[in-house]
Amino acid sequence: MLPPEIELDAELRKVVTIRACCTLRLFVPIKGRPAPEVKWTREHGESLDRASIESTSSYTLLIVENVNRFDSGKYILTIENSSGSKTAFVNVRVLDTPGAPQDLKIKEVTKSSVTLTWEPPLIDGGSKIKNYIVEKRESTRKAYSTVNANCHKTSWKVDSLQEGCNYYFRVLAENEYGIGLPVETSESIKVSERPLPPGKITLLDVTRNSVTLSWEKPEHDGGSRILGYIVEMQSKGSEKWSTCATVKVTEATITGLIQGEEYTFRVSAQNEKGISDPRQLGIPVIAKDLVIPPAFKLLFTTFSVLAGEDLKVDVPFVGRPKPAVSWHKDNVALRQTTRVNAESSENNTVLTIKEACKEDVGSYLVKLTNSAGEATETLNIVVLDKPGPPTGPVKVDEVTADMTGLIENHDYEYRVSAENAAGLSEPSPPSTYYKACDPIYKPGPPNNPKVTDVTRSSVFLSWGKPIYDGGSEIQGYIVEKCDVSDGEWAMCTPPTGIKNTHMEVEKLVEKHEYKFRVCAVNKAGVGEHADVPGSVIVEEKMEAPDLDLDMELRKIVNVRAGGSLRLFVPIRGRPTPEVKWGKVEGDIREAAIIDTTSSFTSLVLDNVNRFDSGKYTLTLENSSGTKSAFVINVKVLDRPGPPEGPVQVTGVTAEKCALAWGPPLHDGGSDISHYIVEKRETSRLAWTVVASEVLPTMLKVTKLLEGNEYVFRIMAVNKYGVGEPLESAPVMMRNPFVVPGPPKALEITNITKDSMTVCWTRPDSDGGSEIIGYIVEKRDRAGIRWIKCNKRRITDLRLRVTGLTEDHEYEFRVSAENAAGVGEPSQVSPYFKACDPMFKPGPPTNAHVVDTTKSSVILGWSKPIYDGGCEIQGYSLIVDTKYKTDGLEEGLEYEFRVSAENIVGIGKVSKVSELYVARDPCDPPGRPEAIVVTRSNITLKWKKPEYDGGSKITGYIVEKKELPDGRWMKASFTNVLETEFTVSGLVENQRYEFRVIARNAAGCLSEPSESTGPITARDEIEAPGASLDPKYRDVIVVHAGETFVLEADIHGKPIPDVTWSKDGKDLEETTARMEIKSTIEKTTLTVKDCIRVDGGHYTLNLKNVGGTKSIPITVKV
């Protein structure tokens, strides 16, 4: 009997690391008698269904094929027999892409953004998580779009979302092995926020135990539908608010109040995202019955209806408590029937008359009565019907006949014949001639005759046209005078009168007293006269015009829009001055009513608006002089006018633009508080609000749709309301740049049986936007479709296309892409066959003469050792004047000479050539990489040439080129000995390319290396970090006297400062036994001949402007 034992190999005692998709094999020798029973399990009970387990009496083998990240963890082996049991474990780390991030949550939602938070994946794939990728998609679409492909924290705010839309979000982790599994929001997220508070609250009714409130909808619903409103109340003396009603409409009645108690009410709106801030009723409410005397609210009191039709008379009224209503007809209480009845409610009473008839005509009295008083109103009902039959008997007084069809202003005579059963009588004698015209009468008296001025010998009169012209045009006016001393009237005008409505009566006797009267004349004759009021003494009265301005008129007078402006100014002057009202800026509206007498003048403007604001002037003028004055500064308190235009639209792109405008010329008498900006697609009629509280006279509008045409309008707002809008011209949303041109100089190189390298140069035009990548496409000669060769955008000017089919012919094209999209493809390359390259064969071997004749020689030779990659097709003799000599030994010096041969023989040899050393040129260096980039310096690093050309590499030349149109020039002016060089003196934000040329001891220069690709000279910030061997996660155990080394690969931009500390104290860089070495990529701490005090907690500290990083390492001696 032997107890079971497990013999774990040293490799299995460490962490077993394996790449994803490989096969995991755990071979463990075991012992025990009897043969122990073997059991494999996982630490957390994960299934081993995919594992293949083979066990014998001497070993057990666990095999998992095609491992993935979920196969990482602790594998526990338990063996048991009758003598006991034994357990051991193996830690397995699968190097794979990471698992899905954990606990994805929505932290905050606004009307244009969503903030996401998550936890790192439980499974990191055996490698540190480098970054996270955040993606979004609208709920109506299937494809996700990337929001941020390089997120270095576990939260992200997704901006520029469309308000009211539903979105799904997902997050993926990325490590050095690739992008892992996603975690997605379980349901769509609506981009909205809590609504604004409800609008103005109005108190509709109050009783002893109830209150009725109404309110306006919120100005903004937060991006989602308003679900309802919450009404809360607070009694006096209490600090607690209690919910008293939840409704879906904008009105609520709250019952159950205590009579005489004082209450305060507030209302909140609710949508899918929550409850808004409350809007409070401005005044407290006391629960008591209102006492309001009854009163009618009728617009008119006469109602008419056609006979046989129904009539409803709605009589609205007010009154608290509810008044009693009674109806009377013709002073008798109304008898209600099924045809005639009256119904009353809280606010009105309705009289219904069905099939109205003449019996319903009359006066109806409505009486309202309550405890506060009573009110009555008389209504007249008119039934429109055919007349009844005339009353008889019929009496005939005379016989007449009407003549029609006459021509106006023609003269006609008439005669009459009688007729009876026997026939017609002889006609009567003809009448006199009558003219066919409408009847006319004498006109009425002229209107408002008055004396306008008096001199020492004349009087000035004026009058208005008669109100009634007698049916004929007024032909003139007759003016008469009467000297009071003799009482006789005399005509002052010709007998036919004058045409004007004013006259100067001359040749009067000075100091005499006169009366005047005026008559109008038409075709019917002279009408009734109109007396000029009072009498006039003819004498010269001279007084300069003057006016008395009231103190109130010397201030600025404010008038509310819709009200009336009334300016009353006392005046004086002899003769009566002529009055002229004016306005400094613009004219007075025609609707103005100006009334002037000898003692005052007034100006009345009804229904004023902002355009009536300004300075009004009054000018008085008579023969003694002129008086002018600024009467008043009038300010009409109104909504503002439209902003000053035109609207300036700048910075137009596919999704945004900037608007600018000027303040309104008319501010409505109040400061402009803000502006409202709205937009409308030209294909639609509805306006939508862009911003409701814009303070400056400019706004950047975003979230517009590419290709749509928009019109914008701006409205100014003051404390009196929203003004008239100013509209912009239509604006088409599109980028100011276009797609790039086609790439140039397409070239196919490095052809093999399954790959080719495609090279090209930049397009002549980048379309006004930086080129962000290229798309390479291929097409098989046997196919018709173009197929993309690169899954991701490439920024280099070459691409190695793999996966080609041997002996198939392919053509290629390349397209450039910028922010506007993908441009036109380049010219299509010729077809190239996918096959391994072929070279010239080597020289034949064993050349010798087989036979000769007098005219020929037969030569023989063997096949070349190297056929160049294809079958030898034949051989040829050299007849040219040049020849390539192969098979020379590298490094030896050679000289050559040539002889010519003809049928006679070989001629003399040529002069000996110069000495040549047999050597190849060196290969170009490896492609340089930028390891440090700042705004003025870029540090490059490259690999040595694979072949040095037979001589030692003695230095390098670094070249640079400014993009896009620069040329290659030297960046190093001394011999660069190392494979690293810092190029200085660069221009910030300028793009560059770099390449390197090698030089060997023989002085040969290599071809230039591949270029770095575009690099922008600007400071790059990357938080410091370090990569350490996994063994440093455990305690490092070393024996006294040994040497231990702690090392780490570091990274960060700019290059981080490196320090080491032990037990919290910084270490010196070099001591007798300790040495610290740091480069831009690596740091090493070496401790020689360690002793006990060298054990402890070491910390690697990295720091740059991007942050700090501390990595602990524990060493036990």
Image (tube, helix red, strand yellow):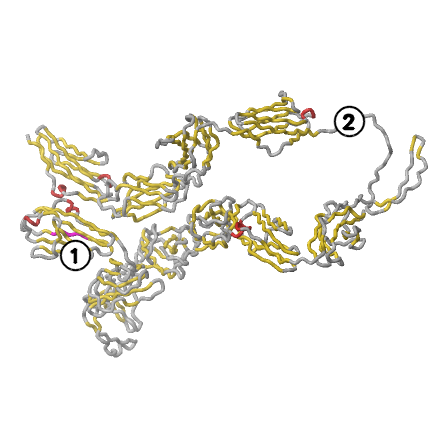
The residue singled out by tag 1 in the image is 1078
- The numbered disc on residue 418 is none
Callout 1 amino acid: Ser
Residue 1054: quadrant of the picture: bottom left
Q: Is residue 971 visible?
A: yes
Q: Earlier in the sequence, mark 2 or mark 1?
A: 2
The residue singled out by tag 2 in the image is 389
- Circles 2 and 1, Cβ within 8 Å, touching? The answer is no
Instruction: Indicate the secondary structure of the residue bearing disc 1.
Output: strand
Which dot, 2 or 1, sits closer to the camera?
Answer: 2
What segment carries the magenta color? Answer: 1045-1049
What x and y, as percent, mark residue 884? 27, 69
What x and y, as percent, mark residue 1080? 20, 57
Residue shown at the point (83%, 25%) measured from the top left: 393
Residue shown at the point (78%, 55%) measured from the top left: 493
Q: Using the image, determine if residue 842 lies above or below residue 1074.
A: below
Magenta segment, principal secondary structure?
A: strand
Q: Is residue 481 visible?
A: no
Instruction: Indicate the secondary structure of the residue bearing disc 2.
Output: loop
Could you say which is closer to the camera, residue 1091 or residue 389?
Answer: 389
Is residue 522 rendered magenta in the image?
A: no
Q: Is residue 281 left or right of residue 361?
A: left
Could you say which is closer to the camera, residue 421 or residue 150?
Answer: 421
Q: Is residue 613 left or right of residue 968?
A: right
Could you say which is closer to the camera, residue 79 or residue 1113?
Answer: 1113
Callout 2 amino acid: Pro
Q: Using the image, determine if residue 36 lies above or below residue 942.
A: above
Q: Is residue 462 left or right of residue 690?
A: right
What x and y, as percent, mark residue 243? 38, 30
Q: Is residue 763 left or right of residue 9?
A: right
Could you say which is closer to the camera, residue 790 or residue 842?
Answer: 790
Residue 76: quadrant of the picture: top left
